[in-house]
Image: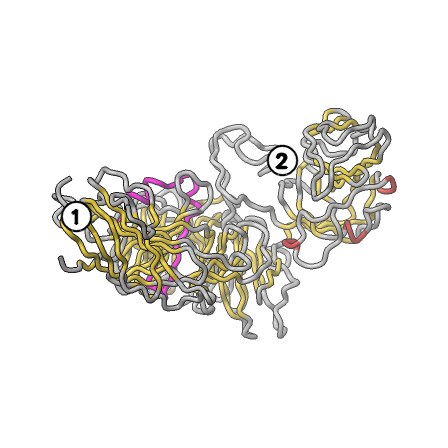
Amino acid sequence: MPLNKLKLAPGINKEITTLSGEGGWFDCDKVRFRGGFPEKIGGWASLSLTPFLGVCRSLWNWITLTQYNLLGIGTHLKFYVENGGTYNDITPIRVTTVDTTTFQAGYTTLNGGINLSVDEITLTSAANFPASGGIIKIDDEQISYFAKSGNVLTGCERGINGTTAASHLTGAVVGSAMLTVTDSNISNLQVDDFLTFSNAVSLGGNMTAPVLNQEYQILAVVTNTSYIVQARAAVVGNLATTNGGAPVFATSADSGNGGGATDTAYQISTGLATYVVGTGWGTGPWSRGPWGSGFTSGIGLQLRLWNQSNYGQDLIFSPKGGPLYLWTPGNGVEPAFSTRGKLIGGAEIPGSDVPVVTNFFTVSDATRIVICFGCNDYGSVTMDPMLIRWSVQEDYTDWTPAATNQAGSFRLSHGSQIIGALQTRQEIIVWTDSSVYSMQYLGPPYVWGFTLLADNISIASTNAMATATGVVFWMGVDKFYTYAGRVETLPCSVRKYVFSDINIDQTNQFFASTNEGYNEVWWFYCSAGSDEINKYVIFNYQEKAWYIGTLNRTAWLDSPLRQYPIAATGNNTIVYHEALVDNGETNPPSPINCHIQSSDFDIGEGEQFSFVWRMVPDVNFNGSTTPLPLTPKVTFKLRPRTNPGSPYGTTVTDNVVSKQLYNVEHAYEVQEFTEIVYTRVRGRQLAFRVESNTLGTQWQLGSPAIDIKPDGRK
């Protein structure tokens, strides 16, 4: 029989069975389609080897008047501006207290000797030791404990931080690495909040002024005005490189209250990395919200989402449900990275009727008007989730409507809350939880006009939309949509696969972006068994093809100001996609595992068994960087089945032997100059699979051909 070319339609189809999808592809991971043919996606390179603190949910790229190419990075713990691979912390300060902070360090002795394996330790006095989660040092051993009962520390873990568990005698000195801090002028503290001490004087012993005067993170809240931090060695530079580093332990000289005339700058409260579903008492982390609140009455705790946009060379940014902040790079040659974001409408940037809470904002490119979606009304501090307000043109500090300006507001009527908005070429598209609106600039006196585009639609999250080639795409709660003058359902050949394996509790993490260089819209989401993003689905709007895969990304920005698309990883780093062939998150880079598999197709007519005896590969390795003397390669797999319900069987790697198993999966290594592969595969149906997992390998598949012989009915 003549060679049969495998010409398969681009895209993955999981809406039908593997056999009914004959002539197409059924599954893939880290593979895209270009020109109708599958190829491995590009790899990624790390922007910096230093991680930042927190999970990034927002990226924004802009250029200053002095040509600095900056990247805003909003995480659940911090807000940074990246420049040249350095993360500059500009997290705003919410309050500074003066001369009101005191420190308490724990120091005592052992009340009874211990051996190297006990997990309960009795102290002479545990009065100045934290109730839980502390670290102590006895001789050269560091020990953590879970809780204390009277003078007994329980749940001890011995020999932590690289030290060795040992026996210790009665009366041995026990020092704590935990500082209990009291500040009478602070309230509403939260675990994980950041603060910086200054002007503190030495407590004596190890608790010197350089140890005290630095940035700390709250580990536990004791009362409304006291909290616990871990004393650690004095550091210079980014806390991201030192947080949780070498602890400093109290001595007898610093076991009492002290600190001198200490000033404390408290950064805005941190958020959550994931959404916490409300189910009653103890749902969320302790000390989230008002002090001691653990009962949520079924109301979930929102994860920290940021949105940001440049206003000229300045950056406006806001956490969801919070106020607006401004960071300005200044007029110097180098941006003022030592300055922090400032509250718009606060003491440093006075304003008029500036919203104090907003769920989302944007800056109109055409009018230089700042617009808040879901915010407080004039004279109120209560969130109205359907209210839209906008500032005076060319003035983000003035929000008071007057006959002489364009400030104003409008309340949408369809839905219960505004979910998000996206600025397009001629309009701003606004989504509520049940409808979608068009917002267009009219000029005075009405300023903005609103048109209902569609009702009874859905959107998965605040960031689940993207625009490409003038078309808006978004992910709903059960299907995909598109808008190009009218709202329509976007046909999807993997819809059932995506929406039947989705964590609906974590939809606020889901987000969309583009990869314009490959005509793609990407959506990242959490599968049903994961509380973190671990999957993606892609629509190629040129090929009209869908494909899927697994990848942990928490934010993505396809910026024309940088050479490659930018993404934030689950490892708290930034990477450039399409910049390498391999996974550059690791050092050195590691291979990317990828594959694509066809739907089943009948061998011959499918009525009788057939025998595949040879295959002509068609694959190129353009762009590969495989180090010599190695050569790039992929694995071709032929997966025969007797019937559609039969298993494919166990993989057998062929060797030149006298006996072969014909009805099991066979794998063949194919290199650049492999001309022909002699196979020994028997079955009624066959699936074809290509995979690679070697360093430096880039490949694109063409139209391989197989040669088939009839082989009887049994």
Q: Nearer the viewer, residue 97 or 601?
A: 601
Question: Which image quarter: residue 615?
Answer: bottom left
- Picture quadrant where residue 149 is located: top right
Identify the element where label 1 is drawn. Answer: strand
Image quadrant containing the N terminus = bottom left
Residue 30, percent across and down?
38, 55
Instruction: Please report the residue visible at 65 percent of the width from the left and 54 percent of the height from the top.
Output: 241
Q: Is residue 484 visible?
A: yes
Residue that label 1 marks: 610
Percent of width and height locating residue 445? 38, 62
Task: Find the magenta span and give its range.
Answer: 492-521
Please name the residue shown 73% across and 36% down the image.
143
Tag 2: residue type?
A: Trp
Q: CA distance from mark 2 to mark 1?
A: 73 Å
Q: Is residue 537 left or right of residue 279?
A: left
Residue 456 in sight from this viewpoint: no
519 in the magenta segment: yes
Q: Secondary structure at mark 2?
A: loop
Crowd tier of the residue under label 1, counting other residues whose Cα lies within 10 Å: few below 14, some 14–19, many 20 or above? many
Amino acid at circle 1: Ser
Residue 603 higher or lower than 227, as above or below: below
How far across and down, in percent of the image, does residue 697 sit? 41, 62
Residue occupied by mark 2: 291
Q: Nearer the viewer, residue 207 or 623?
A: 623
Q: Position of residue 487 (x, y in %)?
A: 26, 53
Which residue ends up furthest to the top in the rendered image?
150
